[in-house]
Image: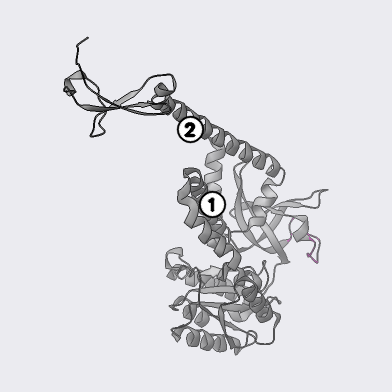
């Protein structure tokens, strides 16, 4: 079906981490500021153009009036609008052209490292499910460290946290961060590393766009989560890291499962063998957990914006499908139960018949298996009669 094809294409594009945050320079054309507050336009250069959309919640921060012909630099992600089958940029940030040398330096380094394969998904390490000790490289005085520690303690109080204080801003910050990462990576007791800082301007976050730092992150043996700035911020460190978190708090959420959630999961795993239905439910839960992990690579706001009008319908359909599935299982089990009852020999006893057994407790089916004076047992509905063979006559 067309919808399935468009959905599959969207998953391919949305799953590409390099398209989850891009910066594009171009000229605005076909600009429309819709009455809903959303902005629709195209971004073009001398050879090509691409459709763009910027939702009201994002365009409130623009400090100038966008218009046709204006050259800008936009930041956002590429995805597919399934209804029309068109791909477009979902813009989070728009700035007038002229970010200067920092922007050029960022793009050049990004292109260089991408060609070298530092952003490949195949090179990224999986996170440990339950790390015993987590190393954190960040400023000791910022809000980021407080948020990280608070969330980690709330989710799993028993986890050990090792903090390496380092500079996260300024010319000396990259070397200081590298020193901290190498120290944490050499320790045998650190299972996971979180590096990052709180929000700031483009210039303040630029320490995490350092080439030496990027190569250091790529060469670490310990899995690393990068959490630099806010959700809309993106750095070279985020692209090289094994996992990119939108905020420091989100990094802590990714690092650990909740203690109560873990206990509940273990209980479910211990009891799922009791019934086949529960086993199917657990399989579906496992599938949903995998989807949830994949969503950390994506921006869930896109799906919410795309399907906000269809969400209720989807859940009603899902509930209906589950209900039909349970009804089908119930009918099947009832049919098996009735078939077993038909074959039950004890039902014949209830109607006045009896079952004859020999002394070996074998069911007697023919007189050929009997001899005179054999002891027999006749099972009736309310007891057993012992008797002896006095005469054998054929039919």
- Residue 246 vs residue 1: left or right? right
Q: Compared with residue 191, is residue 121 higher up or lower down, i.e. above or below?
A: above
- Residue 200 vs residue 20: left or right? right
Q: Quadrant of residue 105?
A: bottom right
Q: Position of residue 384 (x, y in %)?
A: 36, 29
- Residue 277 vs residue 317: left or right? left
- The prevailing secondary structure element of the residues shown in magenta is loop
- Residue 201 vs residue 356: left or right? right
Pointer 1 or 2: first along the chain: 1
Q: Is 63 a magenta residue? A: yes
Q: Quadrant of residue 207?
A: bottom right
Q: Residue at x 69, y 61 (%)?
A: 92
Question: Observer-nearest residue: 350 or 165?
Answer: 350
Q: Position of residue 145 (x, y in %)?
A: 65, 81
Mark 1 against mark 2, which lies toward the viewer? 2
Q: Is 350 a magenta residue? A: no
The reply to whether residue 38 is visible in this rendering is yes
* Residue pointed to by mark 2: 333
Question: Could you say whether the residue bearing mark 2 is in a helix, strand or loop?
Answer: helix
The C terminus - image quarter: top left
* Residue pointed to by mark 1: 285
Question: Observer-nearest residue: 248 or 133?
Answer: 133
Q: Residue at x 53, y 33 (%)?
A: 330
The magenta stretch is 60-70
Q: Quadrant of residue 24?
A: bottom right
Please tell me how crowded label 1 is: few (under 14), some (14-19), or many (20+) other residues with Cα within 10 Å: few
């Amino acid at each position: 079906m067309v919808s399935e094809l468009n959905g599959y294409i969207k998953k391919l594009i949305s799953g590409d981490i390099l398209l989850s945050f891009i910066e594009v320079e171009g000229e605005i054309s076909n600009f429309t500021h819709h009455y809903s507050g959303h902005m629709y336009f195209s971004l073009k250069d001398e050879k090509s153009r691409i459709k763009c959309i910027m939702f009201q919640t994002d365009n409130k921060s623009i400090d100038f009036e966008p218009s046709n012909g204006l050259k800008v630099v936009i930041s956002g992600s590429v995805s597919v609008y399934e209804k029309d089958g068109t791909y477009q940029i979902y813009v989070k940030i728009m700035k007038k052209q002229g970010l200067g040398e920092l922007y050029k330096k960022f793009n050049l380094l990004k292109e260089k490292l991408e060609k070298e394969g530092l952003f490949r998904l195949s090179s990224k390490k999986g996170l440990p499910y339950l790390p015993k000790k987590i190393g954190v490289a960040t400023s000791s005085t910022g809000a980021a460290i407080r948020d990280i520690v608070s969330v980690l303690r709330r989710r799993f109080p028993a986890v050990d946290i090792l903090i390496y204080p380092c500079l996260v801003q300024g010319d000396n910050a990259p070397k200081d961060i590298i020193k901290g990462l190498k120290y944490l990576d050499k320790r045998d007791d650190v299972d996971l590393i979180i590096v990052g800082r709180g929000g700031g301007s483009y210039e303040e976050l630029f320490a995490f766009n350092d080439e030496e730092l990027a190569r250091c992150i790529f060469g670490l043996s310990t899995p690393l989560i990068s959490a630099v700035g806010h959700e809309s911020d993106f750095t070279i460190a985020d692209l090289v890291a094994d996992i990119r978190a939108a905020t420091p708090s989100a990094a802590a959420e990714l690092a650990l499962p909740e203690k109560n959630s873990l206990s509940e999961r273990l209980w479910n795993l211990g009891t799922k063998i009791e019934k086949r239905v529960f086993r199917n439910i657990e399989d579906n839960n496992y599938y949903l957990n995998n989807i949830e992990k994949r969503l950390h690579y994506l921006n869930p706001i896109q799906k919410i914006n795309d399907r906000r009008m269809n969400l209720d319908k989807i859940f009603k359909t899902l509930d209906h499908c589950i209900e039909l599935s349970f009804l089908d299982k119930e009918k099947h089990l009832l049919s098996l139960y009735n078939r077993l009852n038909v074959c039950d020999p004890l039902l014949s006893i209830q109607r006045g018949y009896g079952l004859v057994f020999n002394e070996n407790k074998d069911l007697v089916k023919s007189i050929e298996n009997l001899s005179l004076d054999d002891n027999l047992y006749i099972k009736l509905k309310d007891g057993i009669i012992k008797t002896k063979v006095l005469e054998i006559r054929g039919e």
